[in-house]
Amino acid sequence: MRTYLISYDIPGPRRHILADAVMQLGEAWARPLEATWYVQSSERADALERRLRPLADAADGVLIQEVEANAVLMNTALRWFKRRRPAPPSHGTPAHGAPARGTEAVALAA
């Protein structure tokens, strides 16, 4: 299993579409900051990029980087979530995993 850092600079409502797609990329995900994610996946970075590319246009910035080291997080925390399941039609608001507050160093490998 690989761990990837995924970050993007996408304006407007399309960033929510990309966030939903990121949660579907691997076996687990964490969202320590608004547009910064960690994703655990057995796929290679280029496969993840191919899945996200249709959701970004030429002016959008997307970073996908495999990571191995510990991270230092300030005013946030790292909580891993399992792959997101689609909400039943009666639920209108997706759960984007808002991080808890705190300062800590965490290991990224599961």
Image (cartoon, rainbow, N blue to C red):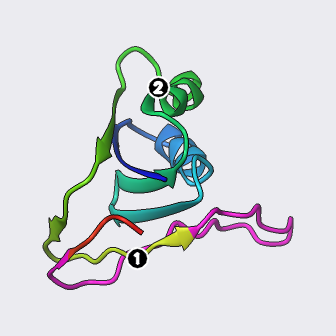
Q: Is residue 55 above or below residue 41?
A: above
Apparent side of residue 19 relative to residue 106 in the rendered image (left or right): right
Q: Is residue 52 above or below residue 58?
A: below
- Give the image location of residue 76, x and y in percent: 24, 76
At x 48% / y 34%, what residue is drawn? 44
**Circle 2: is it few (<14), some (14-19), or many (20+) Cα within 10 Å?**
few
- Amino acid beneath label 1: Arg
Q: Secondary structure at mark 1?
A: loop
- Give the image location of residue 101, x and y in percent: 25, 84
At x 58% / y 46%, what residue is drawn? 25
- Amino acid beneath label 2: Asp
Apparent side of residue 53 relative to residue 34 in the rendered image (left or right): right
* Residue at numbered disc 1: 79
Work out whether residue 51 or residue 90 is closer to the camera in this orientation and state it.
51
The numbered mark at residue 46 is 2
Place residue 30 in its image quadrant: bottom left
Work out whether residue 84 or residue 89 is closer to the camera in this orientation and state it.
84
> In the current view of this chain or complex, which residue is farthest to the right?
89
**Circle 1: is it few (<14), some (14-19), or many (20+) Cα within 10 Å?**
some
- Point out the tag, 2 or 1, that comes first from the N-terminus: 2
At x 52% / y 42%, what residue is drawn? 18
Q: Is residue 50 above or below residue 35?
A: above
Q: Quadrant of the C terminus?
A: bottom left
Q: How would you classify the magenta stretch by its main secondary structure? A: loop
Q: Which region shows up in magenta?
A: 82-105
At x 14% / y 82%, what residue is drawn? 103
- Give the image location of residue 29, x and y in percent: 49, 61
